[in-house]
Image: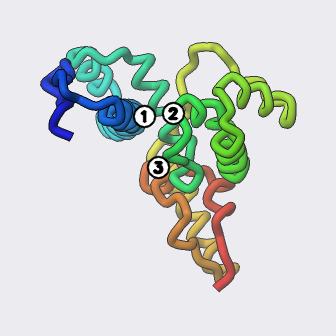
Amino acid sequence: MNEIALNGAKIIIKENATFEEWIEYGHKLKKVESGIQWLLGYWWNYGHEKWDGKAIEVAKKIGYSIQTCRHYGYVDRHVTSFSRLNDVSFSHHLEVAALKPEKQRYYLEKARDEKLSREKLRSIIQKETGYKKKETKSETHRLTLKRYDEIMAMVEEIIKMLNVTIPAHAPLTLLKNKTASLKDALLFLKPK
C-alpha cells in the first residue's frame, strides 16, 4: 500500500489509490486514534504519579489539555488490561471505567458483539446497574505511595495465609501503576 502515506500531519493519497486501499487505511487510522488515547493515559499517569505538579507544567508546554490528560489517565487506571478490548472504542471503555473489572469486560463484550454505540452502551449500563455516569469535571482518585504500600503488604499477607497465587492474566498493571485497591487485587486470587 504505497499509494497512501502519512507525512507529518498530512495524508498523501496518490491518484491511483484503490477504494480498498483507502478503506484499509481508514481502519489503520482508527486503530491509531484509539491507541493514542491509551498511550497518552499511561504517559499521563506515569508522569503525574512520579512528578505530580511538574507533569501538569510539561503537559501544558507540550500543548495537551490537562482535562484531556486526566480523562485518558482515568480510563487507563480504571479499566484493567484484562477488561480492555481492541475492537471497541476508547469511549466505550470510558463508559465502563467506574464498574468492577468483571462487569467492564461483560459490557465491553456486549458492546462489541451487539455493535452498540457509546450512547446505547451507557443507556444499557444505567438500566441494568442503576449506575449513572457523572458528567462533572472532577479529579480522579489516586493512591499515595504510602497507601499503595499498605495495600500491597495486606495483599501479600492474604496470599500467604490463603495459599493462593495471582494468575499471569491478572491485571498486574494495576498493581504496578500503584492504582490497585485491596478489593481489585483480591478479585484475581486463585488457589494453588
Tell whether 107 sits left or right of 174.
Answer: right
Q: Is residue 72 visible?
A: yes
Q: Residue at x 28, y 21 (%)?
A: 59
User: Residue 24's image quarter?
Assistant: top left
Residue on which the image places disc 3: 178
Q: Is residue 174 left or right of residue 96?
A: left
Residue at (65% x, 70% y) in the render: 189
- Residue 96 in the image: state x and y as whole percent: 66, 37
The residue identified by callout 2 is 90
User: Which mark, residue 34?
Assistant: 1
Residue at 68% of width from left, 45% of height from top?
Answer: 113
Front residue of 13/154: it is 13
Instruction: Please tell me how many numbered marks the rendered image carries.
Output: 3
Q: Amino acid at mark 2?
A: Phe
Q: Earlier in the sequence, mark 1 or mark 2?
A: 1
Please state which of the two labelled residues, at mark 1 or mark 3, is closer to the viewer: 1
Quick one: quadrant of the N terminus?
top left
Q: Is residue 44 rendered to the left or right of residue 170?
A: left
Spot occupied by residue 170 in the image (x, y as percentages of width and height):
55, 64
Q: Secondary structure at mark 1?
A: helix
The amino acid type found where label 3 is placed reads Lys
- In this rendering, is residue 173 above or below 54? below
Q: Earlier in the sequence, mark 3 or mark 2?
A: 2
User: Which quadrant, please, contains the C terminus?
Assistant: bottom right
Task: Give the secondary structure at mark 2.
Answer: helix
Q: Pick whichever of labels 1 and 3 is earlier in the sequence.
A: 1
Q: Marks 1/2: CA distance? A: 6 Å
**Residue 57 location, x and y as percent?**
26, 19
Q: Amino acid at mark 1?
A: Ser
